[in-house]
Structures are given as C-alpha cells and as structure tokens.
Image: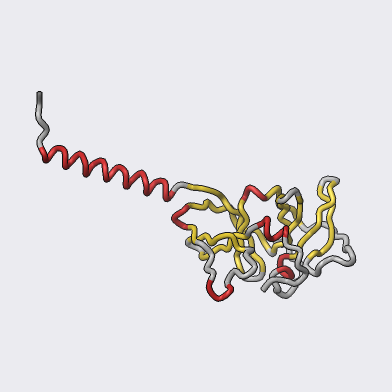
Amino acid sequence: MPTEKPMDTFEELLDLRMKAQLAQQEDYDKEISKVLTFKVAEQTYAIEIEYVTEIIEIPHITVVPAVPEYIKGIINVRSKIVPVMNMRTRFNKPETAYTDRTCVIIVNALDMTVGLIADSVSDVLPVRESNMSATPDAMNVNADKFIKYIVETEDGVNLVLDVERLLGDRTPEPLV
C-alpha cells in the first residue's frame, strides 16, 4: 500500500484551497442582474431591467385633474391608458422643456403599468456583487427608501430605484 508524502498532501490542500478561492471570486463577479440607466437633471438613476417594458418618445400627454403634482397625466400606449410620472417633479428638480432625448420608460410593477419621464436613457449595465453597494442609512440619504441599492461603474455611481416603492407610494409631496 503506497504511503502519501506529507508534502504531496499539503500541496494538494493548497491547490484545493486556491481552486475554492477562485470559484468564490468567480461567483462574486458573476452577473446577477441588469439595470437600465437614465438621467434626471444631472443625476444618473437606474431601474432593474425586469421592470422595463419599453422606452418610447414623449407622446401627447393628457392632463388629469386632482392628481399629485408629479403625475403629468396619461398616455395611450397600444390602446392601453398609462399614467405618466414626471421624474424631475418626483425628485424635486426644476422642470425643463423636453428635448429630442427626453423619453418615457414604461415599467410594470405591482400589477401597474406606469410611464416614467426621464431626460435621457443612457445604457444597460450588468450588476455584479462586486460593483453593488447597500444604500447608506446615515444622514437620511435614503429616508424614503426609494433607492434599492447602488451600482458603482467606471462612469460613477448609479442609484438603483426600488420601482415597487416608487409606484406604490401614495404621498403627494415630491421627494428630496
């Protein structure tokens, strides 16, 4: 019966440990989601791609009375009436005239379809555990809990919105 040398066993253990660490690093860098990034004023926000149905040009918006200020009105998207939320007003930013880059991001959550008016759409980015951070709770950075998490990229920080909270919130005041 052959006997193993202690050195061979030690080297095998080191090799196994190195393989385990590499596998763990690969899991850490594995893509776990994708987000659509867009601009509102000078800030970049993102929405998890699973909520996004489509992106359209600004259509005619019918104003509806007695709704919160951030609800711009309603639009018709393929024979479906969709309320439209002005993200600038929602985040307490001054309104500006629409440009050729202004668009409506159609999202679905909580059995609702809503259009979000954004200044522009930027990109679809992969989300990995390695570039994902929790939202700081200190100093009321996310007091209303509309920011789900933060994605850091070469271009900067992207605030990923919690779409369900954003659509489910019924407070009429704009967010700061």
In the image, is 43 to the left or to the right of 83? left
69, 53: nearer the viewer: 69
- The picture places residue 175, in percent across and down from the top left corner, at 69, 71
Q: How is the image coloured?
A: secondary structure
What's the residue at 70%, 74% (across, down)? 93
Residue 103 visible here: no
- The picture places residue 65, in percent across and down from the top left corner, at 90, 66
The quadrant where residue 100 appears:
bottom right
Furthest toward the top, the residue is 1
What's the residue at 74%, 53% (across, down)? 56
The quadrant where residue 162 appears:
bottom right
3, 22: nearer the viewer: 3
Q: How many marks?
A: 0
Residue 90 visible here: yes
In the depicted structure, whether residue 16 falls above or below residue 49: above
49, 170: nearer the viewer: 170
Quadrant containing the N terminus in the rendered view: top left
In the image, is 72 to the left or to the right of 94? right
In the image, is 64 to the left or to the right of 134? right
What's the residue at 75%, 48% (across, down)? 111
- The picture places residue 21, in percent across and down from the top left corner, at 32, 47
145, 122: nearer the viewer: 145
Quadrant containing the C terminus in the rendered view: bottom right
What's the residue at 71%, 55% (across, down)? 105
- The picture places residue 90, in percent across and down from the top left corner, at 72, 68
